Amino acid sequence: MPVAMITGATSGFGRAAAYRFAAAGWSLILTGRRSERLEALEQDIGNKVPVLTLTLDVRDAEAVARAVEELPAEFREVTCLVNNAGLALAPKPAQEVDLADWHTMIDTNITGLVNVTHAMLARLIATGAGASIINIGSVAGSWPYPGGHVYGATKAFVEQFSYNLRCDLKGTGVRVTDIAPGMAETEFTLVRTKGDQAASDALYSGTTPLQAEDIAEQIFHVATLPDHININRLEVMPTRQTWSPFTIDRD
């Protein structure tokens, strides 16, 4: 039975991915900071497949390394790592943003991803052919927008980190993919606006955004491709979302 480790599994893409992998019979290591949500997930799908939940802050390198070192025997041979933990904050112009919000995004989206990946590399290499690292990036890593500042920069890091991992892992059988979603209706905007439900509703009103399950399906697809196939980057946007012209400042 293959094992998937999913960070940030308590909501959004991570939670949906947990259900998708469970439906296919995978064992699961699910991490997140909200213990009560992890417990609910375990109760819901733990009777279908083996589930190990870890209350874990990916920003804490020592805690991450310890958790990976102490994995029970039945969860040690990990086939797929889904680096999903991440967030956006401060949807305002850079000059109006609290510096602490920038640091939180960097610490979670970059440092957290690096911590988990580094801790898991030896286990994934030991698994070998068919193992996958799937990093959740964003179209914001390629396409700037007002208020994107540090969030977009962190997702650009995810893209380049994924590509460079591919180079280093050549010959190990371990695949690396950057999945870059566009607009998706999850808790993302609620977190970014610190609970402003009206702002979240306005963003998704009158259009058809992606759902968490749409991205979970892409994650599962990439993880279960034949061993010889690597998707380097998969950019996924709603049909109703596209690019805008350059903005021009006029007198």
Image: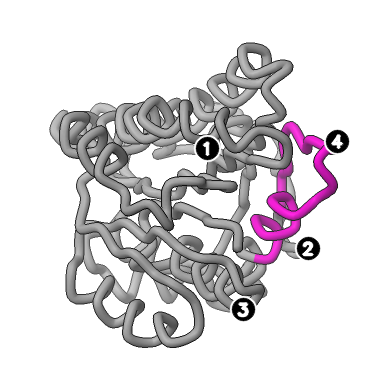
Q: Nearer the viewer, residue 115 or 197?
A: 115
Q: Earlier in the sequence, mark 4 or mark 1?
A: 1
Residue 18 horizontal/vertical position (percent): 49, 68
Report crowding for label 3: few under 14, some 14 to 19, many 20 or more residues within 10 A (C-alpha): few
Residue denoted by label 4: 228
Inter-mark Cα distance, 3 to 1: 37 Å
Label annotation for residue 239: 2
**Which kind of residue does numbered mark 1 sit on?**
Tyr
The amino acid pointed to by label 3 is Ala
Magenta-colored stretch includes residue 81: no
Mark 2 and mark 4 lie on one chain; the one further toward the N terminus is 4
Q: How far across and down, in percent of the image, does residue 122 sit?
A: 46, 27
The reply to whether residue 97 is in sight is: no
Residue 176 occupies which quadrant of the picture? top right
Question: Label 2 is placed on what type of residue?
Answer: Thr
Q: What residue is shown with label 1? A: 145
Say if the magenta span includes residue 221: yes
- Residue range of the region highlighted in magenta in the rendering: 217-236
Indicate the quadrant where residue 51 lies: bottom left
Q: Which residue is mark 3?
A: 23
Number of callouts in the render?
4
Identify the residue at image location x=55%, y=38%: 140
